[in-house]
Amino acid sequence: MSAVSLDIEYTSPRNRLTNAFRLLWAIPHLIIVSALSRLAQMLGLVQWFIVVFTGKRNRSLWDLSRGCIDWEVRAYAYAGMMYDTYPNFGFEKKDEPVAFVLDWDDAPANRLSVGLRLIYAIPAILLMILVAIAAIFVGIGTWFAILFTGNQPRGMFDFLLKAQRYGSRVSAYLYLLTDTYPKYA
């Protein structure tokens, strides 16, 4: 299976007004993404049974789960002050400077890897929790930086991008969209 790729275009200067009220404006997306995340988890469970018993992924379930992660990435990147364009309500992106790539692969899935996925994913989940906690503090710092200077420091942007990228890789791995183990890079 193919690996997850995520890139967000760095822009400077940033809009102080939209960043000042970012979390308020992101609430509708965060509510929808929360529901879609639960849907993707249920689809992952169904996909788990399908893969363990047949050795193949269901393409329709895969496409819907991939769409959920794509929307999740765009919503969290917007809420995390990664870009200023308001995200589209839907599974396809419009003007957002976000490039999320996860391609379908017809190769048969590894039944053992899928069967033991939750056990294999424990180290990645623990690392994701630590990275997410750090990203919250960096996000708060970047909010103040944009609010006062109108620019996002490149180091903060790069860390938040890596955190977003790692989170999307862990989600894709847990939702059985890929057999590639998530790496922080």
Image: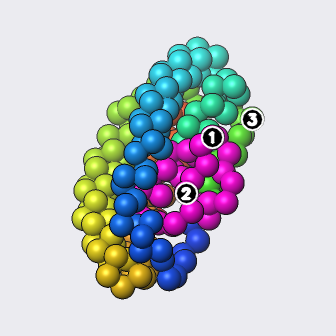
* Residue at the (36%, 66%) spot, across then down: 20
Residue beneath disc 3: 106
Q: Position of residue 174 (x, y in %)?
A: 46, 36
> Label 1 sits on what residue type?
Gly
Q: Position of residue 95 (x, y in %)?
A: 67, 60
Span colored in magenta = 70-98
Asked if residue 18 can be seen in this view, the reply is yes
Q: Determine the image quadrant of residue 133.
A: bottom left
- Is 104 placed left or right of 75 in the picture? right
Asked if residue 114 can be seen in this view, the reply is no
65 magenta-colored: no
CA distance for labels 1 and 2: 12 Å
- Is 100 placed left or right of 161 in the picture? right
Query: Which quadrant, please, contains the N terminus?
Result: top right
Is 137 drawn above or below residue 12 in the view shown?
above
CA distance for labels 3 and 2: 34 Å
Q: Determine the image quadrant of residue 177.
A: top right
Residue beneath disc 2: 86
> Label 3 sits on what residue type?
Asp
